[in-house]
Amino acid sequence: MPLFTIETTYHLPIHRQRNYEAETLDQACDLAIVDEDWDDNKSDVEASGETYVTGIWEGRDAAYIGRALPIPSRFGEQVQRKADHFELLLGLLKILAHVPEGGSADVELWRRRADTAIAKAEAILAGENDPIEGGAS
């Protein structure tokens, strides 16, 4: 039976609570973002993110040694899958929203592409492999 080395990851929120004196809310947020002192940080284990796969190799203890195998898309980080797909969806929406009145010969091509993008978005939301890529991303 094959043996695989699987690397998984999760995000652990680290936060701090500080007071910032500023004239506006936006200025206070800017100050908080540029503040690089994290000596008083706290880990929020209760709010850690989902566990997702970040690497796959065939064999025992093979991480970063052998050839990395493709990760089936459904094992990727859900929020990253959504972010990666957003640009494509926005592009399709812009094209379809600006079709000249009366349409054009390309409308059907773009509708098929939109249907494919919708199928992928639905797979992401369902936690399934991307139908477009045959499961690898």
Image (cartoon, rainbow, N blue to C red):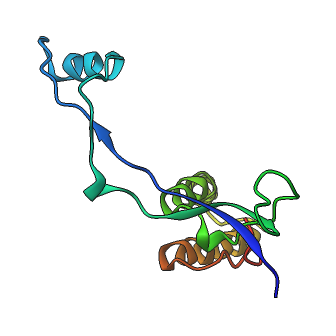
Taking the image as shown, residue 41 lies to the left or right of residue 127, namely left
Q: Residue at x 57, y 78 (%)?
A: 123
Residues 71 and 38: in front is 38
Determine whether 14 is above or below 99 in the image.
above
Residue 14 lies in quadrant? top left
Query: Foreground residue, 21 or 8?
Result: 8
Residue 90 percent location from the top left of the image: 56, 53
The N terminus appears in which quarter of the rendering? bottom right
Of all residues shown, which one is farthest toward the bottom?
A: 1
Going by the picture, which residue comes out furthest to the front? Answer: 60
Q: State which quadrant residue 13 falls in.
A: top left
Does residue 100 lie above or below 18 as drawn? below
Give the residue drawn at x 82%, y 59%. 68
Q: What is the x, y in percent for residue 46?
A: 26, 58
Residue at 35%, 56% (x, y): give it.
48
Residue placed at 60% from the left, 70% from the top?
75
Q: How many numbered dots are placed on residues in this image? A: 0
Q: Is residue 9 above or below residue 127?
A: above
Horizontal side of 77 relative to 136 (left or right) equals left
Q: Position of residue 95 (x, y in %)?
A: 64, 55
Q: Is residue 74 left or right of residue 56?
A: left
Q: Nearer the viewer, residue 17 or 102?
A: 17
Is residue 90 visible from the viewing direction of this image? yes
Residue 107 in view = no
Q: Residue 33: x percent and y percent?
A: 33, 23
The C terminus appears in which quarter of the rendering? Answer: bottom right
In the picture as drawn, the residue positioned furthest to the right comes out as: 67
